[in-house]
Image (cartoon, rainbow, N blue to C red):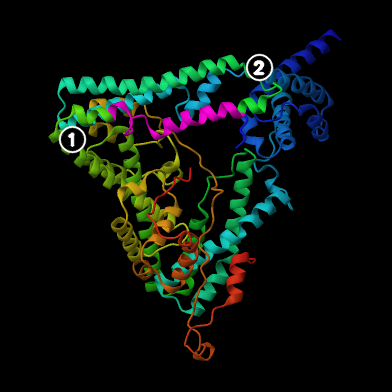
Amino acid sequence: MKLLPFTSMGASGHSLCASSLKGLRNSRLLILLLATWSAVPSARAQQEFTVEQLDQWVFQQHGNSQGARQALNSELLMRIENLERTTKLSPAQKEKLQLLGKGDIQHFFDRYGAFKEKFRGLRLKQTDADFQQKWQNLWQEINPLQMTLQAGLFKNDSLFEKSLTSTLTAEQLQRRAAVDKERQEFRKRGKVAVGVALFEQSLPLREEQRRQLTDLLLSETQAQQWQGNTAAIHVLVTLSRISEAKVKPLFDDAQWQAVKQEMGQFRRRGPGPAIFIDPE
Amino acid sequence: MKRVAGCFCSIVALGGLALGVFMATSGRAHADEGPVNALMKLFEGLERAILGVPAAAPQGNAGIPNNPALQAFEKQFEPAFKRMYVTELHFLRVSSQTTRPQYDKIAEECKPAVTAALKQFAKGLQQQNQGIMMDGPFVDPRRTITDELVKSAKKHLSAAQVDNYKKELDQRLSARKHAMVLNLVLKMDQVLFLTPEQRDQLREVLASNWNNAWNHLQWLQMDGAYFPPMPDSKITPLLTQAQKKVWNGVQKEVVFFGADESVDGGFALEEVWDVPPAQKNESGAVKKSVNGKEAARKGEKL
């Protein structure tokens, strides 16, 4: 995917002006517009991209690195409070987990820091002869950072998560597993409900059908299958992997023909676990 | 002469400033419609800013008769609206057990409303793509269609049939609200790591303080911790001190989602009616209306 940081109006601005100004009513305005328009884009294109811009590309929804750090610290605080509440952490355990969690956050920002230095050294400008190539290379490094952030820093391979088995007692771990399982089940119920609502954007259901479809999805899927954002396609993929004998009775004849046609594209992929890929 | 030159310089300076502002605010909004159109938009805004030219009608070129861009949008979404209509008619049929003559009358009567919904949607989409404020809030076209179906059903169906249809529509709406409430709590849970008791309490709070601004599935697709406006005065008493601190830092804003370009209308459903035995083949299977199917796929004129 080719991505440009600015709208690409800069380089060809002059010729575009000529073809676009016919409709303007005021000649004085025309002159001043030509004067300002011809000056702004070229000046902009010659400017170096800043670290602040890099911050925005990497940290997107958090705005900048400071916002991201704050959000990550909040997440760590909530994770530890949750553990404290459910497993009765000792002060020493709490302190250790805080330290390791902060280590995960720091590790990420160290990665970003190294990349930021490299970016500074590039002194990237839109007018660079090899701008496209440089930008593509840059993107190859920005993307993994974004992905890491979006997936979450406290996953199974994090210091925080890995240390739990050695930090918590067997009883605490058991309690934590039960709480996590309950949370996943809640998540599954929410995702199935929204999945059915999305499905109904394509095929409205009666109350009885809605209840049966919800029950079927809850009984035939695992909580882990409802990770990420839910899309209508999740319901179709799931239905295509469930025995027809269970799915067909949910629908009337006309609905079934339509559903069957839509499911066909997934059935052709053959049997296998219904693993959903986040369409985002 | 000096005065004229001074005045001209001031205008240039003002123009530069205004252009900067417009580039910052409008460049992204107009980037998708091509640089020439984007540039024209910037100039029009600049002209208004500097010379005090009255703003153009809010609909932009969407209001121009024979607007090819608008017609292209209408054409693009016509098959989706047809599918949407057919699935809603089917829902009406099974909810209220309509007879074929009743169905046909309602289907015919509501066609103009579907066309109007399509035009409204296309216009909204075009305004949105041009970065122009839509004439009014975005109305879910499916809702427009069902509203018309209810009106027509009242004319052509018995009171009991209408009640059954409306009951099913209400239940659909309730299910949608339930899904949204559940998922907003789920979204909160991702940020605050709630206890099961807190989740139950929050579900009750949100259900009893329902806000239509929540009723956008797009909220659930957004990354990060963006939330719609929430009834904080009722939420915060349920949270711990640490949770309150985090919750207060979460962005809660009104977001204008506008028309949904991804609207696909629905599955290609073909209404099947019992046909006289003479039209059945030897094995007893009902002949399929092949032409009807093809027409549905192509999205024949409403």
The amino acid pointed to by label 1 is Leu
Q: Which residue is under mark 1?
A: A173
Q: Foreground residue, A187 or B205?
A: A187
Q: Residues within 10 Å of mark 1 (few under 14, many from 20)?
A: some
Query: In this picture, is B190 found above or below B296?
Result: above
Most extreme residue toward the top, as rendered?
A: B2
Query: In this picture, is B128 found above or below A195?
Result: above
Q: Foreground residue, B33 or A242?
A: A242
Whether callout 1 and callout 2 share a subunit is answered yes
- Residue B154 visible in the displayed image: no
Q: Which residues are magenta?
A: A136-161
The amino acid pointed to by label 2 is Gln
Position of B259 with respect to A151 (left or right) is: right
Q: Residues within 10 Å of mark 2 (few under 14, many from 20)?
A: some
Task: Examine the residues drawn in magenta and state their main secondary structure.
Answer: helix
Quadrant housing residue A4: top right
Q: Position of residue A45 (x, y in %)?
A: 69, 21
Q: Which residue is under mark 2?
A: A47
Position of B219 with respect to B123 (left or right) is: left
Mark 2 chain: A
Report helix, strand or loop for mark 2. Answer: loop
Between the residue at mark 1 and the residue at mark 2, the CA separation in whole angstroms equals 54 Å
Q: Foreground residue, A5 or A153?
A: A153
Q: Position of residue B17 (x, y in %)?
A: 68, 19
- Residue A128 visible in the displayed image: yes
Query: In this picture, is B215 found above or below B233?
Result: below
Mark 1 chain: A
Q: Position of residue A101 (x, y in %)?
A: 30, 24
